[in-house]
Image (tube, helix red, strand yellow):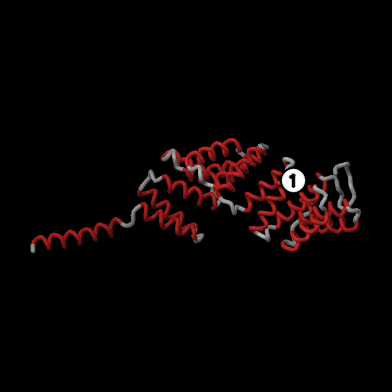
């Protein structure tokens, strides 16, 4: 009887202490992630802050709070949290990955590459990591390295449409036009409304002399997205090549209507004027 009373007393005290102490750092972290998933940023931040108050060496919370701060526009606060997560845990994969994205957006390509390299050392089977590294390498002018990383991405995630499309673009850039078309075909089989793949495939077909196929792809891209400036400009180039100056002028004018600055840049770099005539010797 005495044993039962002591046990009951213990349970009562445990209930009181649990109520007084409240949730653990892990509980607040879980609440914060749940709030972040439903875009309740302020409540998520409050939960992350509370988790860190309880457990100041909780690296994963610093990493997640960094992502949240970046989303809210506090870029310096985000970087500070990524750095702190890595100081606490030098193997914090997510902090390296997110800090790499932060540096990439700031133009620190070498720093971004170093961080994603470290992240992939820690977790070499993450498709998104290779995809991000490919984008960095492409930006740095390492087309072959980027192509290799897109291929690794696709090996890990065969239905990654953007990786397939980007690899196709790089193949085209490196002179493998037929290989590029194969990638665009695959991307479109996975996502028949992927309008940029139609534009890119149209450009590749044009290079191979398949002008009717190119025109069909540009038309399809515009059907999917009637505001796609690149498609109008590409179709204008094709029409000019076929001698349809009026058609080229109409498409260039439509592109100017949608985005004057972008259209001017595209026309200028390709040696065209808005009236559909050539202004340089570029093909």
Q: Quadrant of residue 152?
A: top right
Can the viewer see residue 105 in this picture? no
Q: With 83 as the anchor, is 239 left or right in this view?
A: right
Can the viewer see residue 90 in this picture? yes
Name the quadrant of the N terminus.
bottom left
Return the residue nearer the eye: 255 or 106.
Answer: 255
Instruction: Residue 75: give x, y in percent of width and height.
Output: 55, 46
Dot 1 lies on which element? helix
For disc 1, the marked residue is 177
Instruction: Determine whether 20 is above or below 74 in the image.
Output: below
Instruction: Residue 229: give x, y in percent of width and height.
Output: 76, 55
Return the residue nearer the eye: 107 or 225.
Answer: 225
Q: With 59 as the anchor, is 22 left or right in this view?
A: left
Instruction: Residue 193: give x, y in percent of width and height.
Output: 68, 61
Q: At x 53% / y 43%, what residue is drawn?
A: 99
Name the quadrant of the C terminus.
top right
Q: With 31 as the anchor, is 275 left or right in this view?
A: right
Instruction: Residue 97: give x, y in percent of width and height.
Output: 52, 44
Q: With 218 as the anchor, is 142 left or right in this view?
A: left
């Amino acid at each position: 009887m005495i044993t039962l009373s002591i046990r009951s007393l213990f349970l009562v005290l445990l209930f009181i202490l649990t109520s007084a102490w409240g949730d653990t750092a892990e509980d607040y972290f879980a609440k914060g992630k749940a709030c972040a998933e439903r875009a309740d940023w302020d409540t998520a931040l409050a939960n992350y802050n509370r988790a860190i108050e309880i457990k100041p060496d909780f690296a994963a919370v610093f990493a997640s709070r960094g992502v949240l701060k970046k989303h809210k526009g506090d870029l310096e606060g985000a970087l500070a949290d990524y750095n702190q997560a890595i100081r606490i845990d030098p193997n914090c994969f997510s902090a390296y990955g997110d800090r790499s994205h932060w540096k990439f957006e700031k133009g620190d390509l070498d720093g971004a590459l170093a961080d994603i390299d470290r992240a992939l050392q820690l977790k070499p089977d993450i498709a998104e990591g290779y995809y991000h590294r490919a984008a960095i390498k492409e930006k740095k002018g390492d087309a072959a390295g980027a192509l290799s990383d897109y291929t690794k991405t696709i090996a890990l995630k065969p239905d990654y449409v953007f990786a397939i499309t980007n690899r196709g673009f790089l193949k085209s850039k490196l002179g493998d036009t037929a290989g590029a078309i194969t990638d665009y075909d695959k991307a479109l089989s996975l996502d028949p409304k992927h309008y940029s793949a139609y534009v890119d495939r149209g450009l590749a077909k044009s290079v191979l002399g398949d002008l009717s196929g190119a025109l069909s792809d540009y038309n399809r891209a515009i059907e999917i997205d009637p505001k796609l400036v690149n498609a109008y400009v590409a179709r204008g180039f094709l029409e000019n090549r076929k001698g349809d100056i009026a058609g080229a002028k109409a498409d260039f004018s439509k592109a100017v209507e949608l985005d004057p600055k972008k259209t001017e840049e595209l026309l200028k770099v390709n040696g065209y004027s808005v009236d559909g005539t050539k202004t340089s010797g570029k093909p």
